[in-house]
Amino acid sequence: MPAKDDPIVIKKYANRRLYNTGTSTYVTLEDLAEMVKRDENFVVQDAKSGDDITHSVLTQIIFELENDRNGQNMLPVSFLRQLIAFYGDQMQMVVPSFLEQSMMAFSKEQERMREQMNKAFGTSSMDMMGMSAPMKMVEEQTRRNIEMFQNAMRMFTPMPGAPEQPAAADTETGDDNPRSDDLKDLREQIAAMQRKIDSMGDT
């Protein structure tokens, strides 16, 4: 018997059917989406190999939700383009942590934002001025996310005015030191991104 805090195991079979071992019932992607909303922890395993395929299944849920004709797209095209551009890029190692921290910070604020939204849309007048408070909160959260990303970038960029390492230090080993070249390329890409972020923060 699994412990109380252990995640529920969902098994996916070759016929794409999903089986909830906790309730001994077959479930759908919509059911898993509801479990996520109820904050029920689960993992999805391939029924044959036992491999953890939670990531791919959650990605599939997002795909289905984004393509639901009765729903509303939540991921802007500009965001999707930027996200795709990061794949295979040296910045890819930073993006997951940034997105995770951003969503965690946003989740902490969601209750307060919901209260503001309820006040804004709870009035019969539906005055657009009522949207000012929640929108300001979104803008504030966005700026905090940008600042957090900037702080993460500073971990990879040299301090202003820091002296360059002498070339002799790289040749002492007798190698061309390709790692130094990779770091230089990474810093150049980060600097370009930093300029973009700064321009976003000024808007």
Image (cartoon, helix red, strand yellow):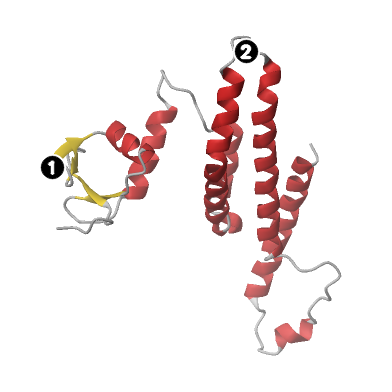
* Residue drawn where x is 78% and y is 81% of the image: 167
Rendering coords of residue 107 (x, y %)? 52, 43
Q: Is residue 12 left or right of residue 140?
A: left
Along the polypeptide, which appears first: circle 2 or circle 1? 1
Does any portion of residue 89 appear in the rendered image?
no
Answer left or right for 169 relative to 175. right
Image quarter hosting the N terminus: bottom left
Residue 108 in the image, given as x and y percentages of width and height: 54, 45
* Amino acid at pointer 2: Met
Q: Quadrant of residue 162?
A: bottom right
Closer to the camera in the image, 99 or 140: 140
Q: Which residue is mark 1?
A: 24
Q: Say left or right for 79 vs 154.
A: left
Q: Give the residue pinned by disc 2.
A: 126
Q: Residue at x 65, y 42 (%)?
A: 141
User: Label 2 crowding class (10 Å Cα cut-off): few <14, some 14-19, many 20+?
Assistant: few
Q: Secondary structure at mark 1?
A: loop
